[in-house]
Amino acid sequence: MTVVTVRTPAKINLGLSVGKSRPDGYHPLATVYQAIALYDEVKARPAEAGQFTVTVTGEGQDDVPLDDNNLVVQAAQLLAKRAETNQGAALSIHKLIAVAGGLAGGSSDAAAALLACDALWGLHSSREELAELAAELGSDVPFCLVGGNAIGTGRGEAVSAVLARGSYEWVLAYAAGGLSTPQVFAEFDRLDAVGAADEPEVPEPLMTALRSGDPYAVGLALHNDLQPAAIRLRPALRRTLEFGDEFGALGSIVAGSGPTCLFLAADSEHAIDLAVALSSSGVCRSVQRAMGPVAGARIVT
Ligand code: C5P
């Protein structure tokens, strides 16, 4: 039986500048994305015409919907509609990326489902066609197809290349439970109703640091406008971030809309030390290590 397997990475935001809420409710963003070597795996198998199913195993499996609310199912349905095919798909996801963790896990799975179903159904869609569908599915989905380092503008879906050097060792502290992205943006609005820019920009020190490839400079320049909102909704994150600082992280930041916290290490040895210290600290539920940048969603079989 045919099975298409796609490996798809988590995303982090090295800089996340958020502007004033737009009339459509979204916020204009200027962000630097990086894909990291922490992967979910999505498989697509043939199914009866018009039938779409999904099963989930791994990290946070009980928190992932198994109906049409699953973004993977929506991705398969959207691709089928656009390609005017009546083929179905039996999808399965194996998760390592935290659910509702600020790492675009659901978005990355959706990007993977587009690639997997495209191959399963023999559609040969172009990258541009898939990117267009990806943008309809969610703001982070186009980046998950591309991976590497990239700038995101618009609501995050307009992805362009960025000049960046170096590879980076990250330690991720998973929190107990997730945070709802719309709630974090709503809290951002409450906290920053007048201060937000109409056209946010990536801070220049971050661009300079990325061009240099120096992790110390990048650590100092990490920036997330959603961090105060995430901390307001989950005050315990403050302690988690402080812990990273105390143990010599080059930078400590909330990942995207949180509640995952992200620490930059100087090298892999430092990352192991930091991960061990965090694991036994009690300031988080569990710890992952991952280097970045890596490629976006890719077919592996
Ligand atoms: O695009 P996506 O469906 O992933 O976004 C989830 C939610 O996050 C949106 O419904 C919106 O509330 C919020 N969001 C936002 N501005 C963005 C991206 C997301 O307000 N640029």
Image (cartoon, grey):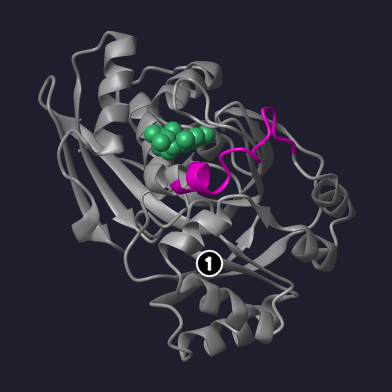
Give whichever of 206, 19 is nearer the camera.
19
Give whichever of 243, 72 is nearer the camera.
243
Give whichever of 255, 166 is nearer the camera.
255
Which of the 4 image quadrants contains residue 264? Answer: bottom right
* Residue 81 position in % (x across, y down): 27, 13
Q: Amino acid at mark 1?
A: Cys
Quarter of the image that includes the C terminus:
top left
Residue 170 seen from this side: yes
- Above/below status of 230 relative to 134: below
Task: Identify the residue at horizontal 24%, vertical 12% (top origin).
Answer: 85
* Residue 13 position in % (x across, y down): 61, 50
* Residue 97 position in % (x across, y down): 41, 58
Quarter of the image that includes the N terminus:
top left
User: Is the distance from the Cβ of mark 1 to the nearest ligand 1 atom less than 8 Å?
Assistant: no
Which of the 4 image quadrants contains residue 117? Answer: top left
Residue 180 located left or right of residue 86: right
Q: Residues within 10 Å of mark 1 (few under 14, many from 20)?
A: many
The secondary structure making up most of the magenta span is: loop
Q: Quadrant of ligand 1?
A: top left
Q: Is residue 192 magenta?
A: yes
Range shown magenta = 187-201
Residue 160 located left or right of residue 28: right
Task: Identify the residue at horizontal 58%, vertical 36% (top origin).
Answer: 146
Q: Which residue has dot 1 on it?
A: 261
* Residue 31 position in % (x across, y down): 65, 41
Task: Identify the residue at horizontal 41%, vertical 49% (top origin).
Answer: 105
Which of the 4 image quadrants contains residue 106? Answer: top left
- Above/below status of 189 relative to 176: above
Residue furthest top in the image: 84
